[in-house]
Amino acid sequence: MFGHLIKRFIQMIFVLWIVSVLVFVMMSFTGDPTFMMVPLDATDEQIEQARRILGLDQSHLVQYWRFLTNLLQGDFGRSFVFRQPALQLIMERLPATLEIVFLAMIMALVVAIPLGVYAGAYPQRAGSRALMAGSLIGISLPGFWLGMVLIFIFAVKLQMFPSSGRGPTEMIWGMRLSFLSWEGFRHLILPAVTLSVGTLAILMSIIRAEMMEVLRQDYIKFARAKGAANRFVLFKHGLKNALIPLITVFGLMLGDLIAFATLTETIFAWPGIGKLLVDSIYRGDRPVIVVYLMFVAFLFVVVNFLVDVAYALIDPRIKVS
Amino acid sequence: MTAQTDAPLLRVRGLKTWFHTFGGVVKAVDGVSFDLSPGKILGIVGESGGGKSMVGFSIMGLVDRPGRIEAGEIIFDGRDLARLDDDAMQAVRGRQIAMIFQDPMTALNPLYTIGNQLEEMLTLHTDLGPQARRARCIEMLAEVGIPQPEARLGAYPHQFSGGMRQRVVIAIAMIAEPRLLIADEPTTALDVTIQAQLLRLMKAQVEQRRTALILITHDLAAVSQMADRIVVLYCGRVVEIGASAALIASPRHPYTRGLLDSIPASHQGRSRLPQIPGTVPDIRKLPPGCSFAPRCPRAAERCRAEVPELTAAAGGSAFACHFPLEASA
Amino acid sequence: MAANMPAAPPAPQRSLQRSWQRFLASELAHNWRRSASAIAGSIIILGFVVMVTAGPYLTAQNPYDVRQLDIMEAFKPPMWLEGGAFQYILGTDQQGRDVWASIVYGSRISLFIGLAAMLGSVLIGATLGLVAGFYGGRLDAVIMRIADIQLSFPSVLIALVSVGWVVYARTVRGATLREKNREYVQAARVSGLPNHKIILKHVLPNVLTPLIVIATIQVGTFILIEASLSFLGVGVPITQPSLGLLIKNGFDVLFSGLWWISVFPGLFIMLVVFGINLLGDFLRDELNPRLK
């Protein structure tokens, strides 16, 4: 187990290094940031000087080396627009994103698990068929469009929820969070619902498929032969086995969630890291884009590492091998 | 529990369990009857696909869709289990009637410890406190011959060998002291050397508690050493039933004869082991007369046209054959 | 009677007919006819394809032709609402473009991108997967060639393909590894067939099934992703809006209550992707023996 963790850790470092190369190559081919730095009426000399400061006068290899050593020293560059460290900028916006992602995740799980178990246990029933059709629709609709429809219905027409922005926040453990006040929570609902629908639909269909597979196993019938109630068998013996593949899916879905969050934040003008990325792309704020990409890669790698660990914790068969 | 020896604990009458599939009706069990008294062992034998397991699942009320108990009675302790709903069956399962499955590799949930799965039985069916439950589990594991039972409580199924797992399954089945145990091919998936050990263990367990046992198997040799009575099934129907010793000594149905002949031990010295020609027919397309006719050496015109009725013979035995073998002795 | 018939080689027409008949008699076709969702999915897809091919004949207006637009006709609601006109069934947008016409033309772009990205992914992914599974190393040259090809494609396609091929490469590689050790491949090797022929003739047909299933569903996924990218402004050029870009255009005026400009293209995406997914799920259930 320990050796396995070490191996995974080395893999993590390797993946992050590859990402740093990719990010660097991408940045090198997408325009010259010099013109973001200098005034419009800059002289050739000023431009030349800016290029020297940015290190653009040197070869790509030297530039990459500088990029890498800066990263390793924790220097992620400063935003051209906000004139503050890019990492700090991302960290400030992160709680807002985490807030809607977590709320969406919780909503998706709370709804998807019982419904998926039901649909998997009684696949022939009309209710299960309706659930699966609903899940397929959920997978088929563009999430950002759903957000717009929700805004139109609940914010513009019914005026039940605010249409955009974050509302009041409170500082907890150094993070600005909005779910603690009712007004802040009201702002949170529509973005979180938008984000959760696609996840919910996918989770439900996966849980159903896994349940159907698990319920075919002998140990389910044996548990019923023991005289356990049907529901007890479904949840104690069925669900736990069905959840194991789900954990892997969870790690893979993180990428989708971050991408969807970007769209959701754009629609709801939610000041998270996704909105920051889109704004930075429009403004050509290169350091912020770089840090965002590196940060997401880091998040992705860490979450998948944790997924591996969770796997070993829930499935006793893995500990030994 | 001081049941009279003669009052049967279980009376099965005309049991029919059919499967309604797209390809037609599969009559997995088609009119099976037998009695079983407390402390007795009944063997149900037949080839694979003969509907043996379905008899067991029908008694447990665990027939999966599209299967259904179509007709018949399963009188257990005065109640007809075939008419009970699932909630009422739940109280019977595990507590009154327990079952042992064929493959111990898949019968145990891989994610829970042995102790957890054993204790689950006690939580479901007794009022014992946690301490007492644990003590009872250790005791039970020791009884089925698992070394260091206390330490093994926390182990997971994958840490056990197949034989050990089947011992655990037997422990789970017996721990709530059921009155009837159904063992569905309990040793088929195991090594030959372990098979005899486990059969002995099961026999000791049921004798000690006067539990009735239904042993479902394709292994006539094993069943002849264990059972008091034997039911021979072919294509969902009883072809012969009788006291174990008499049936082995003098089978009346050609199919029973064929099964006996293909046991290696009874043919020492002969060069070739005889076998029943052909295979079990597709149960959806049974021939009109006797199902065994296409494979039977004694079959005549009448066998292909007319289904033989189960006919009573001496000593409480019965057979379904137009041209039975002579009764010896 | 058959004896005096001249022995003619079977016309290609007839052999095509025969394989169509064989398909109709197959289990897949049989189950297709029994599955309401598979039929519904097929009808939706068929309708979409007809609409995309017949495009210009279904609309009175070419939304890309500025001369046909009339700014005075802007912001017309759908025809069943107050102020709507029969001429503009689903209303018009801020430039007087017919929303229905925009959807028809936008569908062409969306479907083209979805299909092209899928085909590119299949081609690259399946090739890489086959080669990687069959040979092991020697990938370098192949990957360089792909890099050359990629550079000459529009950026959205590259983005989608560069994400999409991975699934195929992985699936096909796994299936190839499995097939490679089967007797029939070994036999072909022993008989001296060159490797590329073994791959094309023996291995590829046996890994096609999972490929078809993934490809079907991926067209839908790509349409969705393209819509998202266009919405963020990094998708197709603004002169030829896809369905996603139509939604984005409508978003700007949503708060003034002009919902139809964005709602209808979105509904349309949903319908089409839903149809594709229905059929894809059916194919997956039918072609995946593990689930049977």
Image (cartoon, coloured by chain):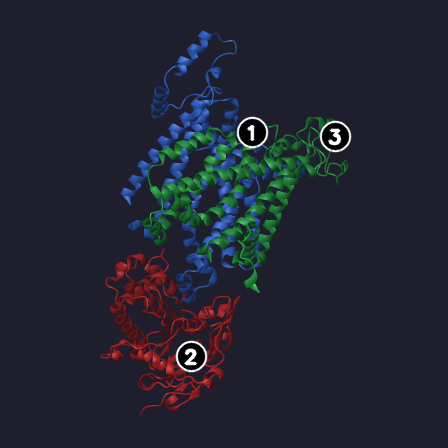
Chain colours: A blue, B red, C green
Q: Position of residue C141 (x, y in %)?
A: 37, 33
Task: In this rendered view, identify the residue nearer to me: B214 or A189.
Answer: B214
Marker disc for residue C73: 3
Q: Which residue is mark 2?
A: B292
Quarter-wise, where is residue C75 in the image? top right
Badge 1 or badge 3: first in the primary sequence: 3
Q: Position of residue B314 (x, y in %)?
A: 38, 91
Which label lies toward us, 1 or 2?
A: 2
Q: Position of residue B303 (x, y in %)?
A: 45, 84
Number of residues whose C-alpha sits closer than 10 Å to that of mark 1, classed few (under 14), some (14–19) or many (20 or more) = some
Three-letter residue code for mark 2: Phe
Q: Element type at marker 1?
A: loop
Can I make out residue A107 in this image? no
| Residue at 42% over, 61% down | A220
Which label lies toward us, 2 or 3?
A: 2
Same-subunit check for callouts 1 and 2: no
Same-subunit check for callouts 2 and 3: no
Can I make out residue C251 in this image? yes
